[in-house]
Amino acid sequence: MFWEILFLILFLSVYFPALQQKILEQRRIIMIREFERKRRSRVIVLIHRQESVSFLGLPIARYISIEDSERVLRAIRMTPPDMPIDLILHTPGGLVLAAEQIAWAIKRHPAKVTVFVPHYAMSGGTLIALAADEIVMDPNAVLGPVDPQITTARGQYPAASILRALEEPNPNRDDETLILGDIARKAIRQVYQVVFDLVRDKMPEERARELAQVLSEGRWTHDFPITPEIARNLGLPVQEGLPEEIYELMELYPQPPQQRPTVEYVPLPYRPYRRPAAKE
C-alpha cells in the first residue's frame, strides 16, 4: 500500500506540471490567434523570462539566441508579403548576430511591421525594434542603448570603456589589452553602421547618423532606460498605448514559481474611490 501511494504521488508530481504547461501553451495559441484575427496580421511573440534549472530551482536568464532568430525567420518566411507582422517583444537583449538577423528579416518584410513593448526591450531587443515601421510601448516601458559589450576571460566590458581606458597612459599595457581595443573599435563601428542602415529611410540622413552614434557610442550605461519620450526625441516612430490583449497574453508567460512571491497585490482592477456624500 505504501509503495502504491508513493508511486501515485510521484506520478502526479510529474504529470500535473506537464499537463498545466500544455494547457498554458494552448491558451497562448488561442489568444495569439484571436489577436491575429483582430489585427489581420501575423503575431510573433519573443518573450524571455527566467527559467528554473531542473529541480534545483536555480534561476538562469534567457537571451536572444540563434534558436530564436531561426524561429522568427521561419515565421516571417511563412507570412505572405502583403500581411502585416506584429512582434511582441520582451527581452533583456542577447546575441548581436541573432538580433541583427531578426532585425534585417523584419526590415525586408514588405508589409507593415509593428513592435509592441509591454515592459522592456533592451540592447538587442532595441536593435530589433529599430527595424520596425512602428514601435508601440507601454507608457512605463523602456528601450536601451545598443553599444557593444566585449566578453573577456575576466568578464564583460563596454567597448566604449575599453577605448577610454586605452587613452590613459600606461607603460605596463600588454598586447591583449591592445587587441581588445581593436576589437572594441570594430564592434562600435559595426553596430553604428547597422543602426544607421536600419533607420536611414525613416528620417533625414543627418538625424539617422546622430541616432546611430547616440545608441552605439556608449554615451550611457548599457542599462540606461530609454523611455517613450526620449525615444521620440531621438526621432524613433514610437506610440504609446498597448492593446489590452497584450497585457493578458503576458500573463500567460509567467515567471517560474518561487517559494514566496516578491510582489503581491489583490489581482482585481479597482475603480476610483469616491468619498461618501456628507449627511445633512
Image (cartoon, rainbow, N blue to C red):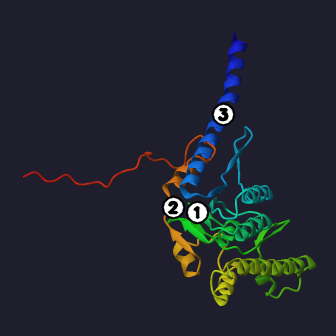
Of 186 and 109, the residue lying toward us = 109
**109 in relation to 198, above or below:** above
Residue occupying the point 78% across, 66% down: 101
Residue pointed to by mark 3: 17
Q: Which residue is mark 1?
A: 116
Residue 204's quadrant in the figure? bottom right
Q: Residue furthest left?
A: 280
Residues at circles 1 and 2 in contact by the CB criterion of under 8 Å: yes
Q: How many marks?
A: 3
Q: CA distance from mark 2 to mark 3?
A: 31 Å
Whole-number angstrom distance, CA of label 3 to CA of label 1: 30 Å
* Residue at 45%, 47% in the rendered image: 265
Element carrying mark 3: helix
Camera-side residue of 20 and 155: 20
The residue to which callout 2 is attached is: 242
Three-letter amino acid code at disc 2? Leu
Query: In the orientation shown, which residue stands out farthest toward the right?
Result: 175
**Residue 55 in picture, x, y percent from top left:** 73, 37
Residue depicted at 79% across the width and 87% down the height: 167
Q: Nearer the viewer, residue 133 or 234?
A: 133
Foreground label between 2 and 3 = 2
The residue positioned 83% from the left and 66% from the top of the image is 154
For marks 3 and 1 on the same chain, the one whose residue lies earlier in the sequence: 3
Measured from the top left, where is residue 123 in percent x and y? 69, 68
Determine crowd level at label 2: few under 14, some 14-19, many 20+ residues with C-alpha closer than 10 A.
some
